[in-house]
């Protein structure tokens, strides 16, 4: 199952999606701890990473 997932999407995409999920969790944690602006700033990293993934996606 995991090998099929890696074969279908590639290891790089899976790692980047995990990085995005961790970024969202960290941003929410920081935001809820009371550091509102830092949480928002870090929360903006997730769509930026996804945007770079889309931009640098190889053309098929």
Image (cartoon, rainbow, N blue to C red):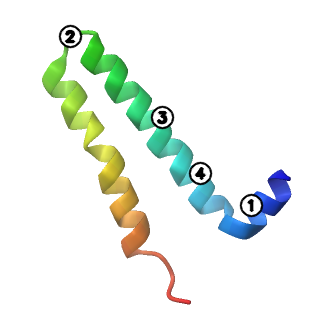
**Helix, strand or loop at mark 3:** helix
Name the residue located 62 percent from the left edge and 54 percent from the top edge.
Answer: 14
Tell me the residue that label 1 is attached to: 6
Tell me the residue that label 4 is attached to: 15
3 and 2 marks in contact (CB < 8 Å)? no
Of tags 4 and 2, the one toward the viewer is: 2
Mark 2–mark 1 Cα distance, whole angstroms, equals 38 Å
Disc 3: CA contacts within 10 A as few (<14), some (14-19) or many (>=20): few
Tell me the residue that label 2 is attached to: 34
15 or 2: nearer the viewer: 2
Name the residue located 41 percent from the left edge and 70 percent from the top edge.
Answer: 54
Mark 3–mark 2 Cα distance, whole angstroms, equals 19 Å
When asked about the image quadrant of residue 34, the answer is top left
1 and 4 marks in contact (CB < 8 Å)? no
Tell me the residue that label 3 is attached to: 22
Mark 4–mark 2 Cα distance, whole angstroms, equals 29 Å
Query: Residue lying furthest bottom in this view?
Result: 60
**Helix, strand or loop at mark 2:** loop
**Helix, strand or loop at mark 4:** helix
Please tell me which of labels 4 and 2 falls first in the chain: 4
Q: Position of residue 40 (x, y in %)?
A: 20, 32
Mark 1–mark 4 Cα distance, whole angstroms, equals 10 Å
């Amino acid at each position: 199952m995991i090998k099929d997932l890696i074969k279908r999407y590639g290891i790089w995409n899976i790692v980047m999606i995990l990085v995005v999920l961790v970024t969202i969790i960290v941003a929410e944690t920081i935001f809820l701890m009371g550091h509102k602006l830092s949480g928002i700033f870090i929360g903006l990293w997730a769509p930026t990473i996804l945007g770079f993934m889309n931009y640098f996606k190889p053309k098929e």
